[in-house]
Image (cartoon, rainbow, N blue to C red):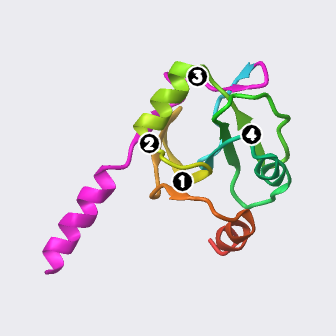
Amino acid sequence: MIAAAFAYFNYKFSEYKFIDFKEWVFYEKNDIFIPTHEKYIVVFYSSKDKTVTQQLAEINLNLPILAIDYYNEVHTNSATTTFLRSGTKNSLSFIQRFNIYESPSIFFIKKSKDTLYKQDSMIRKLDNLDDLTKNIESL
């Protein structure tokens, strides 16, 4: 039973995907995004929901946030949130790679080397940013 559980969790962890920011180009306003932190919270969201956009701009967590907009609108970065956008092909590839089915969705990424990051959590639907603040602060 223990061996089966271990094998299952190894299999599930191997399902986690990689993202190389040299190959996948995202923009902050007009500049190409280059990651500088070891870990990020990735939030895939719709800027058509103005409350989520405003909450992402105002939220203050102990990990930096990469907020990737489905509609690719330009937003001003805040102290802890970097708003990213990209071309349609890149956005669709991102959605497909990480199997994102709902908006807003959230997951963590962790640096492997240089600009290569590995998904470090399951992808979850983000129901409430206030709950996110409470849960992340305890990490």
Mark 4 element type:
loop
As measured in the structure, the alpha-carbon distance from the residue carrying label 2 to the one carrying label 4 is 19 Å
For this rendering, which residue is in front, 79 or 71? 71
Q: Which residues are magenta?
A: 1-30
As measured in the structure, the alpha-carbon distance from the residue carrying label 2 to the one carrying label 3 is 16 Å
Residue 2 magenta-drawn?
A: yes
Mark 3 element type:
loop
Which sits earlier in the primary sequence, circle 2 or circle 4? 4
**Residue 16: x, y in percent?**
37, 49
Circle nearer the viewer, 2 or 3: 2
Q: Which mark is residue 98?
A: 2
Kindly identify which residue carries mark 3: 25
Residue at point 14%, 74% (across, down): 3
As measured in the structure, the alpha-carbon distance from the residue carrying label 3 to the one carrying label 4 is 19 Å
As measured in the structure, the alpha-carbon distance from the residue carrying label 2 to the one carrying label 1 is 10 Å
Which sits earlier in the primary sequence, circle 3 or circle 1? 3
Q: Is residue 22 visible?
A: no
Task: Name above or below for residue 138 compared with residue 68.
Answer: below
Question: Mark 1 and mark 2 in contact (Cβ < 8 Å)?
Answer: yes
Kindly identify which residue carries mark 4: 47
* Quarter of the C terminus within the rendering: bottom right
Which amino acid, mark 4?
A: Ser
Q: From this viewpoint, which residue is outermost toward the front?
A: 48
Is 27 placed left or right of 101 in the picture? right
* Quarter of the N terminus within the rendering: bottom left
Task: Name above or below for residue 118 compared with residue 122.
Answer: above
Task: Name above or below for residue 34 compared with residue 8.
Answer: above
Which sits earlier in the primary sequence, circle 4 or circle 1? 4
Task: Name above or below for residue 50 compared with residue 85.
Answer: below
Q: Which mark is residue 107?
A: 1
Mark 2 element type:
loop
